Image (cartoon, rainbow, N blue to C red):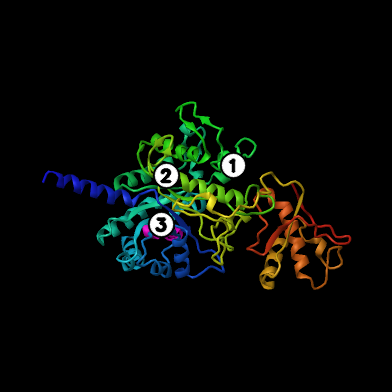
Amino acid sequence: MGLLPLYFFFLFLSVSSGEFSSQVGVNYGQLGSNLPSPKQSVKLIQSLGAKRVKIYDANHDILNALKGTNLQVCIMVPNEIINNISTSQKLADSWVETNVLPFYSTTKIRYLLVGNEVISGSPKDIWPNIVPAMRKIKKSLKTHGLDKIKVSTSMAMDVLESSFPPSNGTFRSDIAYSIVRPLLQFLHRTKSFYFLDVYPYFAWVMDPKNINLEYALFESRTIKYTDPVSNLTYTNLFDQMVDSVVFAMKRLGYPDIRIWIAETGWPNAGDIDQIGANIYNAATYNRNIVKKLTAKPPIGTPARPGWVIPSLIFALYNENQKPGPGTERHFGLLYPNGTNIYGIDLSGKTPDSCFEPLPKPDNNEPYKGKIWCVAAKGVNETALSSALSYACSQGNKTCDPIQPGKKCFKPDSLFWHASYAFSSYWSQFRKTGATCYFNGLATQTAKDPSFGHCKFPSVTL
């Protein structure tokens, strides 16, 4: 009889730890014009060995497709309705009743994020309302008996004002006490997670001369860094970045809040001027991070050895409608047709030797030469005409050479006029953040599009 309570203790332990086990999941983004259906996508997610999935809304078609599966699901309150929910319990109740309650009995919704990288990409007036909205969503979940669902929000690394060395991790002064501390209080009280987006790729790209690529890819066997304050030794960039957040939380009085990796990954392609974005590096990083995160016993990080780090790889698909530089559209594990970009098993059970050989990387060093920004082939002409008008309206005589009678004018040639305008605009404004994208209508090229006496402006790297 004395063994019975002990048995139930271990049963409880195994069940509760399973909720935040080391199983790896995937982020299912939908910003593509040519993606498989939700039902097909769920099958593909399962084929990758994923045990969890995060979506960036509460798409009912996707939630229906997830019914009856064993996938743990993370859904999201969109950034744009955070302000309204923060001031209305009725609206929070309505959102939960519409997007959670109808699916909960058959779909394993276990996590609910209020916003995605709000601090990084949304107007400042939303920031103070993140936690109030989280409180109202949590209250609604409790009212409906959905206490198992953990509520949080996702943060990128740019919420830190210092991340090196890791022991110096510090949240930005403009948000540390007004936003982050209330967030940590909420997470501590509700036993939830700090959802963190971690991309060693972006940290490496910012300083490739001083950060070793192999260190960023978990491939280094000799490079180590010892934090001069904590004396902790690091063997990869991911651990450094995560631990800087650990120390930042500790600095605000919350040393034990668990971290959940909401996004991590490496781009499989990008623009000509984006180094290191290739299939070889993407496969290497993602395979290695899966090995680390699924290791038994758990590895954790130097600041938290042995801790389980639940995680989600970004992303399921290459998404052709994501704005910004080319890498933004190339983080997928799969092409939009559902085929693998490279072999990977998110369960961590398949040895690398079982996968097909990877193509050798050809852009790990910065590109040197000229690049032009031209109109992409086969795009909508009406949209192209609007983009041309936009580029020409930005001043600095961007489009003077393509006016009638000028040396770059071609009668009835929208494609060439747009290509000139895009190159001219990009060459002038790239340093202030302009990209060669134009809502998917433009692409970079290393082939000079100039003709005759018409010389297209270019960017020289």
* CA separation in Å, label 2 and label 3: 17 Å
Dot 2 amino acid type: Ala
Residue 257: in magenta span: no
Badge 3, how many Cα within 10 Å: few under 14, some, many 20+?
many
Residue 117 placed where, x, y %?
47, 51
Q: Across the whole image, how many numbered discs are drawn on residues?
A: 3
Q: Are marks 3 and 1 in contact (CB under 8 Å)?
A: no
How packed mark 1 is, by other alpha carbons closer than 10 Å (few <14, some 14-19, many 20 or more), is many
Label 1 is placed on what type of residue?
A: Trp
**Residue 344 position within the rendered picture, expressed as x and y whole percent measured from the top left:** 51, 54
Residue for badge 3: 52
The CA span between labels 2 and 1 is: 25 Å
- Seen from the viewer's position, the closer of residues 125 and 353 is 353
Label drawn at residue 204: 1
- Earlier sequence position, callout 3 versus callout 1: 3
Mark 2 burial class by Cα count in 10 Å: few <14, some 14-19, many 20+: some
